[in-house]
Amino acid sequence: MDKQEAFLDQLWARLAEQGDFPTLQYCIDHVFSSLDAERNVGEMASSILSDFSLSQKIIRLSNSAMYRSFGGEVTTVSRAIMVLGVDTVIHLTLGVRVLDFFQTMPENRPRAAQALKQAMVAAEFTRTLAEARGIADGEEAVVCTLMHHVSRLLLVLYVPEAWDRIAAMCEAGEQAGAQIGEDDACREVLGVSLGEIARAAAVKWRLPPLIAGAMSAPPLPEGAMPETHAGWLGAVARLSSQAAASILAGQDDPLAESPVRANSSLRADSPLQAANPLLAAAQRLGLEPAHLGQALAQARALTTSMAATDAASQAGDDAGQQGSKPADALARLQRAVAEVRQEGGAMSIAELAPFALESAMRALNFSRCFLMLLNPSARRFGARLGFGEGMREKLDQLSFEEGFVPDVFHFATLADRPLLIEDTFDREAAHRVPRWYREAMPDARALLLIPVRVRNRCVALICGDWGDARFTGALSAEEADAIVQLAAEISAGFLRSAPAR
């Protein structure tokens, strides 16, 4: 066994000892098993929406400048999947999951916090570069950039004594006037480069071969351009890493002070010569100087915003914290109706249902939301689609017969308007809540039931709750009207799918 194999075995053993490797492996496997082209939009959205924090991050990232140009503002995970495509959403989710894993690690060493910040800043730098260039595979490049930093994070967190030696070697070289890169120092200390560690991690975690190949792509020779997509991805990761290191080191950003036009050029004696290495590398990758300036500015802004809280989970959180009905529910509902009307006409009912359901969930800030469909031959309503924590596992428990029983679900099927139960634990309402629902949702306090009617027969129910939060305020007539309009769009979808009924 050579030195490289021995070290990698030691590294994986340490991850296994701390119990972290199985968690990360499960997380990555789950991304690829639950998000794939074989699943429909509803199934994919349900998987993401089972994690509130993840869904907020996916929507925030989906609203970057590049993605908005594909079809306007993205307000739901369902729309993100339809507009951006399966591959982009998979890479978005994977990038978020990898970062989330390392953010949960104990940061009892200053180097760990610094390495994590560098990874986040580099990822933002890559994303902005891709946005500026209009590259459709931008999130794929972000994942490669994060994996480029994974080797550093693994060493800092699991082999800190080796990382201390690497850092000391780099610092000593800098003081002596001889630049020693982290990659060279890592090979000297451990017999393996940072890129080789990242590639081994990508292979072990069963990431797509392209990502592993990008990790092992050698640095470009001076003046050379990448000849393969993997080579381009690897070069972008290195460029982003250099930029992030400079920003976090507090070096001045000359491009921020003197913006560079897309058609500008720099002389060797230019006062902006400190930026020349980044500019030269960017131009070899098909990126303009202006793109670099935008990416540096955005990465610097992220660095500033990370002062006190995790900017990735706080910035752009459109839905806010989970709780009761939001104060601006009417505006949200009206926007949801407009979006569903605009998009729904070209959708099948299988596509429209999850889109409308999630739109209702976002507008009303439900903690959980599910759609019950009538099976006419069995004369039973059964939950077919659900969003929120634990909903995918609960669907089989949610079912009732069409006939009549004096409970809130049967009352809702007879109504033309939404039925709101403000407190399901109140003495006057509790006996109207069926046992099957209470067993599946023991904490649900307020419940909203929205009938979907086709030819005067209730064919579906949208059911939403706010967890154990108390319902505040009331459901106004205008809000109820907007909810009825949203249900009508689903009804129209049923009619389009089965015009002969």
Image (cartoon, grey):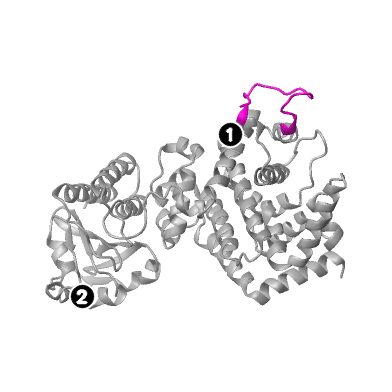
Magenta span: chief secondary structure: loop
Is residue 258 part of the magenta span, yes or no? yes
**First in residue order: circle 2 vs circle 1:** 1
Q: Position of residue 134 (x, y in %)?
A: 56, 35
Query: Which residue is found at the position 84% from the left and 53% from the top?
Result: 172
Q: Answer with the quarter of the image where residue 201 lies.
A: bottom right
Q: Nearer the viewer, residue 490 or 114?
A: 114
Residue span colored magenta: 257-275
Q: Secondary structure at mark 1?
A: helix
Q: Nearer the viewer, residue 85 or 388?
A: 388
Is residue 276 placed above or below 337 in the rendered structure? above
Q: Badges 2 and 1: C-beta atoms under 8 Å apart?
A: no
Choose top left, top right, bottom left or bottom right for residue 231: top right
- Does residue 471 lie above or below 327 as drawn? below
- Residue 444, position in %: x, y? 27, 69
- Density class for disc 2 (Cα within 10 Å; few <14, some 14-19, many ≥20) is some
The residue labelled by disc 1 is 294
| In-image side of 59 versus 148 (left or right) | left
Circle on res. 82 = none
Per the image, label 2 sits on a secondary structure element best described as: loop
User: Would you say residue 297 sits in the magenta stretch?
Assistant: no
Q: Is residue 195 among the parts visible in the rendering? A: yes
Occupied quadrant, residue 370: bottom left
Name the mark on residue 434: 2
Examine the rendering and report whether any part of residue 209 can be seen: no
- Amino acid type at image mark 2: Pro
Mark 1 belongs to which amino acid? Answer: Gln
